[in-house]
Amino acid sequence: MNTARTVRLSRRSVLLAGAGLGAGLVAGCQQAGPTASPPENVLQTKAPTSEVAPVVTGRNLSAGRYREVDIVIIRPEGVPPEPIPVCIALHGGLGGAKVFLDYGVPQVLTQIVKDGAQPFAIVAVEGGNWIGNKDDDPHRMLNEDLPGWLTYHDLASTPFSVVGFGEGGAAALNQGRSPGFQAVAAISPMLFASWDAAQRTNMFDNQARWERLEPLRHTMELGKTPIGLWCGTEDAARLDLTKQLAQKVKAVKTSFGPGGSDDAYFRAAIPDALKFVAGYL
């Protein structure tokens, strides 16, 4: 049985979105209708809800990032195709949303639900390094573009939680500063104790952007949300700062076991992180 469906974005849909119809309308479109057709026809290529596969991948036009981005929607197997809560999944580094498929997240999610958790979906989107620049704002994408995409795919438009690793871990903590999140899980988050340390990475175009996005500078805001933190004991660059953050935000769950900042550790930690957020449904 084919459990994945790939959705493509048409050139006409991009033009329509640019004309102000909204990126949420074009999410998941496979083909365009005739030029004379009304805008509603853009939505007619969406599969009926009863045919939604457990894994859907596609490309959406993001106004926040000023480009097309990958989106991956993962639902638990065997769950009726109806609107369910959403956990956002944020990748690390310059990787992409599809890395969560490589990490076996569809199987992990299905097992968590089989073990008794309330069904929820995991939605991963491509955010670059989650820092961006003047023409690329990944957090604007999450806050302004993503709700429409979720609604289009018959999911709850307001995510209840967010999980991320590496740069995506820091981005998850930044999202957790917004009202409405019931839980945040960050694995090996990339943190910087000072502007000098951040500047040496050449990731930030200016100090103001680092100050706005550095979780260690916003611990009072983060302290209002249940937070789980994971980091490998061999991850020398991140372990101490993650422990400092855990203390400052009074993290409700921490895990500092063997491992480094690599795929093996991320793959091992993600199931525990997903179980953590599932406990807040």
Image (cartoon, rainbow, N blue to C red):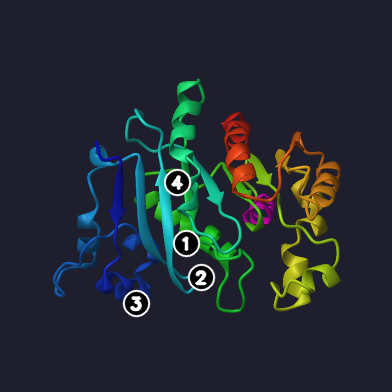
Task: State yes or no: residue 169 in magenta.
Answer: yes
Q: Which x, y percent locates residue 9? A: 30, 65
Residue 252 occupies which quadrant of the picture? Answer: top right
Q: Which residue is mark 4?
A: 101
Q: Is residue 226 left or right of residue 96?
A: right
- Is 70 above or below relative to 233? below
Q: Secondary structure at mark 2?
A: loop
Residue at image location 53% in from the left, 48% down from the top: 88
Q: Amino acid at mark 4?
A: Leu
Compared with 2, 13 (above or below) is below
Looking at the rendering, the stretch of residues picked out in magenta corresponds to: 168-178
Q: Which residue is mark 3?
A: 19
Residue that badge 1 annotates: 145
Against 195, residue 262 (above or below) is: above
- Contact between marks 3 and 1 (CB within 8 A): the answer is no
Report whether 3 appears left or right of 115: left
Q: In the image, which is nearer the foreground, mark 2 or mark 3?
A: 2
Give SS at disc 4. Answer: helix
**Which residue does the image show at 62% across and 76% down from the upper left?**
133
Pointer 4 or 1: first along the chain:
4
Disc 1 crowd rating (10 Å Cα; few below 14, some 14-19, many 20+) is many
Q: Which residue is mark 2?
A: 65
**Residue at screen point 74% across, 43% down:** 232
Per the image, label 3 sits on a secondary structure element best described as helix
